[in-house]
Amino acid sequence: MKVKKLKIYAFIDSQNLNLGVRSLGWKLDFKKFRRYLFDKFRVDKAFLFLGYVKQYKNLYRMMRNFGYELVFKPTIKNNKGEVKGNVDAEIVLHSAAIEYKNYKKAVIVSGDGDFYCLYEFLNKNNKLSRIIIPNHKSESSLLKPFQEYKSFVIFEKNKLIFEKNKSGRRCK
């Protein structure tokens, strides 16, 4: 008899993850993070949500090569000239509707309280596997009811930090 594999998908708020880790004083290695998601949480598909900026095409290609499926949102510039591409609605739409029937469990990567309704929905439907929080210092207090699901990136820093060798290239 064939054992059916439990499909686990990750939905990643790239800005929350990147800025959350950087605010702790280090840089995340996205290649290592993708491997970590598979090794620790058995994540089959990792959806990386981000605002599209044309000059980052090479970065997007690299992320795809690392195993991420990219979901873009058009960006705008605010009155300070900063690029904005809030992806919260896209994450909710993909995890609660577009991809919902395709996975058994979801891992959400964000410490943002804006996802409270999503966590509640996934939990009620027995689909919430994990909430990975990039920065424990900026974790929303709205996440208190979900203690059993929380993991923190900071505790995996040694495994996930981006390191360059002497030639300036990525360490393996």
Image (cartoon, rainbow, N blue to C red):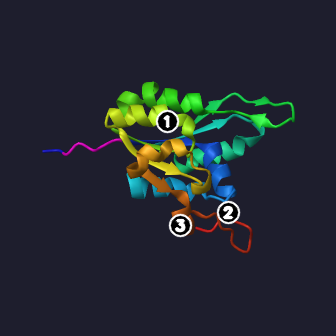
Image quadrant of residue 60?
top right
Residue 159 badge: 3
Can I make out residue 34 in this image?
A: yes
Residue range highlighted in magenta: 3-7
Seen at 59% across and 54% down, the residue is 135
User: Disc 3 on helix, strand or loop?
Assistant: helix
Seen at 53% across and 56% down, the residue is 33
Q: Nearer the viewer, residue 61 or 119?
A: 119
88 with respect to 81 (left or right): left
Image quadrant of residue 40?
bottom left
User: Disc 2 on helix, strand or loop?
Assistant: loop
Q: Position of residue 9 (x, y in %)?
A: 42, 41
Q: Position of residue 133 (x, y in %)?
A: 53, 51
Image quadrant of residue 129?
top left
- Specify the amino acid type for callout 1: Tyr
Question: Which quadrant of the rendered structure holds the C terminus?
Answer: bottom right
Q: Which residue is mark 1?
A: 116
Q: Main secondary structure of the magenta part?
A: loop
Extreme bottom residue here?
166
Label located before the other in sequence (2 or 1):
2
- Specify the amino acid type for callout 2: Trp
- Specify the amino acid type for callout 3: Lys
